[in-house]
Image (cartoon, grey):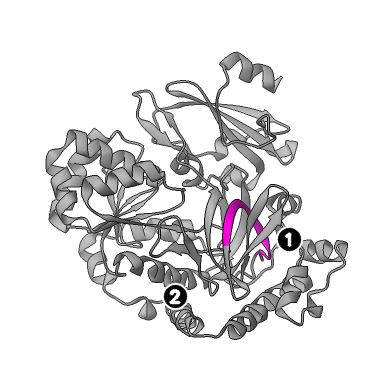
């Protein structure tokens, strides 16, 4: 059975606050559909924290072996890939044997049809991710993983004082936000239309803020910082409200600029928490005492650091996704790891998703984390790379590299660029544009329109 999570989110977003507020008070361990997974994961987090080093390794070994054997038996990709590397997961006997499991990356996954890397487990839902470099991938997740994820998210957010029933304001990439600021009962949040200029946002936002008194802002750091700096310069009333009533910022999906983060924290006298996660659900890590030092939850997924030619890569294994298993999956992020008793205890990110943006017709910043990644475009199910080039304010070229020519003709109709004051043009290429060093940037810069055209010829 396939669950339509998008439709479920739409239904929850239409529940009014007067009903959403009492719903938010129900502990997650009692909520229909996720209670069992949430309770089990909460219990595992507590038990794991008290394990010895040997017990932790045995716990990880048991879970990684289980999903590896399942994938080897039930999917074409892992049967092919493991045989090619002369590996059989049934032969895993010790924690050290996990190092023998072949690492897989997005390029390998894209080379197989989704049916060949997935299984027909119950209650699965199709999702996709743009990735930090605009290299999309579609896959299935299991609905049972939602409770598992929320348990870990709440554990991470406790580090900044967040409680599950707290109302927050979200700055994300949703394309359909009613009345500029919308209430979402699923996340018990006020959702801001980040595609509108800030002077348009503040009026509707203040009406809800002063009445409902949320204590946290949550979302993309680039959008949150830009908004708060605008407020400091343009709206004294809102600035004073945030400075006196705001508890903290929950920063997600991007690597926060240290300069802007420090400036905002000083201006508003508040705390912020950054955490690492992605749609693939292999790694979840959170800051604790030190900024930019991320501690992975090994009960969420097995997080490793693998030394390759260009540095240490963050690699993760999802324990609980048997719909589209991801085992020793190279996230593509470069890290500096800290090891303790045979496990990675923390890491800092050397290279990850940044707060890049383009400008709409009025000069308003449209952040690519929202425009590209936050919307999870249907086109991601068919293309290998997406890149952005802006020749002038209000115009954006989307360069798409298709996996096959059949998908190219109607690819522009699979992007959702509604509610954005930008004119989009589409270019289809066989391969993505690369920098001199061979990297594939999401935002193509330092290039004129003529140079861009010449590159595509």
Q: Is residue 430 visible?
A: yes
What crowding class fits label 2: few (fewer than 14 Cα within 10 Å), some (14-19), or many (20 or more)? Answer: many
Q: For the residues marked 2 and 1, what is the alpha-carbon distance in whole angstroms? A: 31 Å
Query: Is 178 in front, or is 151?
Result: 151
- 83 with respect to 239 (left or right): right
Dominant secondary structure (helix, strand or loop) of the stretch shown in magenta: strand
Q: Is residue 177 visible?
A: no
Image x and y of residue 303, in percent: 60, 66
Q: Which residues are magenta?
A: 324-337
Which element type, helix, strand or loop, lies under badge 1? loop
Q: Residue at x 47, y 56 (%)?
A: 6
Q: Residue at x 26, y 61 (%)?
A: 167
What is the x, y in percent for residue 71?
A: 73, 70
**Residue 322 highlighted magenta (yes or no):** no
Instruction: Read off the residue under disc 2.
Output: 34
Residue placed under numbered mark 1 in the picture: 103
Q: Is residue 279 left or right of residue 90?
A: left
How many discs appear? 2
Q: Residue 262: horizontal and vertical position, in percent?
A: 32, 46
């Amino acid at each position: 059975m396939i669950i339509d999570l998008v439709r479920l989110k739409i239904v929850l977003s239409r529940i009014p606050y007067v009903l959403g507020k009492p719903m938010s008070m129900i502990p997650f361990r009692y909520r229909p559909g996720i209670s069992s997974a949430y309770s089990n994961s909460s219990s595992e987090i507590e038990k794991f924290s008290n394990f010895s080093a040997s017990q932790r390794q045995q716990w990880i070994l048991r879970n990684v072996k289980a999903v590896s054997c399942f994938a080897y038996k039930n999917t074409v990709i892992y049967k092919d890939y493991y045989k090619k590397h002369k590996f059989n997961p049934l032969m895993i006997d010790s924690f050290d044997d996990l190092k023998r499991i072949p690492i897989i990356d997005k390029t390998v996954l894209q080379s197989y049809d989704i049916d060949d890397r997935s299984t027909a487990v119950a209650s699965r839902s199709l999702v996709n991710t743009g990735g930090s470099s605009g290299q999309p991938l579609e896959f299935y997740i299991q609905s049972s993983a939602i409770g598992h994820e929320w348990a870990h998210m709440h554990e991470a957010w406790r580090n900044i004082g967040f409680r599950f029933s707290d109302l927050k304001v979200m700055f994300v990439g949703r394309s359909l936000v009613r009345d500029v600021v919308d209430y979402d009962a699923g996340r018990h949040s006020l959702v801001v239309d980040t595609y509108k200029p800030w002077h348009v946002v503040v009026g509707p936002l203040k009406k809800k803020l002063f009445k409902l008194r949320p204590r946290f802002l949550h979302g993309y750091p680039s959008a949150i910082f830009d908004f708060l700096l605008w407020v400091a310069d343009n709206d004294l009333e809102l600035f004073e409200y945030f400075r006196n009533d705001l508890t903290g910022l929950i920063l997600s999906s991007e690597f926060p600029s240290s300069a802007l983060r420090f400036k905002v924290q000083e201006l508003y006298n508040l705390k912020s928490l950054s955490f690492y996660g992605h749609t693939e659900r292999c790694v979840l890590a959170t800051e604790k005492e030190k900024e930019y030092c991320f501690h992975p939850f090994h009960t969420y997924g097995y997080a490793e650091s693998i030394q390759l030619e260009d540095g240490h890569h963050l690699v993760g294994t999802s324990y609980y996704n048997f719909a589209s298993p991801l085992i020793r999956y190279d996230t593509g992020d470069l890290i500096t790891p800290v090891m303790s008793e045979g496990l990675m205890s923390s890491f800092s990110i050397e290279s990850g998703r940044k707060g890049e943006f383009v400008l709409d017709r009025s000069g308003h910043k449209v952040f690519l984390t929202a425009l590209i990644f936050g919307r999870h475009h249907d086109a991601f199910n068919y293309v290998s790379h997406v890149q952005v080039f802006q020749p002038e304010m209000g115009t954006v070229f989307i360069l798409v590299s298709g996996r096959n020519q059949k998908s190219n003709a109607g690819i522009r109709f699979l992007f959702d660029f509604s509610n954005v004051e930008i004119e989009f043009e589409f270019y289809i290429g066989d391969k993505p544009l690369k920098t001199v060093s061979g990297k594939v940037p999401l935002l193509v810069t330092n290039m004129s329109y003529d140079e861009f055209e010449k590159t595509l010829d």
